[in-house]
Image (cartoon, rainbow, N blue to C red):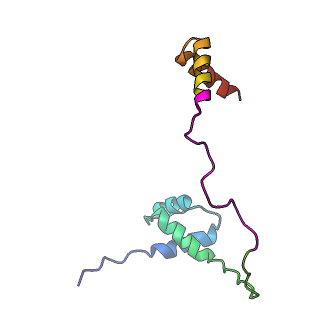
Amino acid sequence: MAKKKASGPNKSEAIREYLKSHPDAGPTEVATELKKKGIDVALALVSNVKAAMLGRKKKKKKKKGAKPGPKTGRVGRPAGRPAGPTDKVSLSHLIEAQDFAAKVGGVEQAQALLKALGKLS
């Protein structure tokens, strides 16, 4: 059997007593004040003891009643292909893009203009 530590002050009890006299104190304040008294406590322990003192709020019971029936009508969008851009590009659009790039001085210049246009809208 393992040897027990020499019994020291009950940390949880010290935290409870401090919180009774200072109910609005935060965990860091409690820990620093108890450290001044020679009791070294972790912030997590202070938080746990404080939460246990406040107690847990009871959950509200649901009222018994008729269970909801099946939903009528559709909710959301119908199943199928996801909406979004397609990867298909028509030949006429490619030819228009080529003409545009030639007019503005090249593909890089056309890309720069389209980026600027995107920032405007």
Please tell me whether residue 39 is drawn above or below residue 104 in the rendered image: below
Q: Nearer the viewer, residue 94 or 32?
A: 94
Residue stretch rendered in magenta on the structure: 72-93
Q: Residue at x 62, y 46 (%)?
A: 84
Q: How many marks?
A: 0
Question: Which residue appears at 67% of the width and 24% of the height?
Answer: 117
Q: Quadrant of the C terminus?
A: top right
Above/below status of 19 relative to 109? below
Residue 6 visible to an observer of this rendering: yes
Residue 85 lies, in percent from the top left, at: 60, 42
Quadrant holding the N terminus: bottom left
Q: Position of residue 15 (x, y in %)?
A: 53, 71
- The secondary structure making up most of the magenta span is loop
Q: Nearer the viewer, residue 78 or 33?
A: 78
Image quarter for residue 74?
A: bottom right
Q: Is residue 32 above or below residue 84?
A: below
Q: Where, by quadrant of the figure, is residue 52 drawn?
A: bottom right
Q: Is residue 67 left or right of 51 when viewed as pictured? A: right
Identify the residue at image location x=65%, y=64%: 24
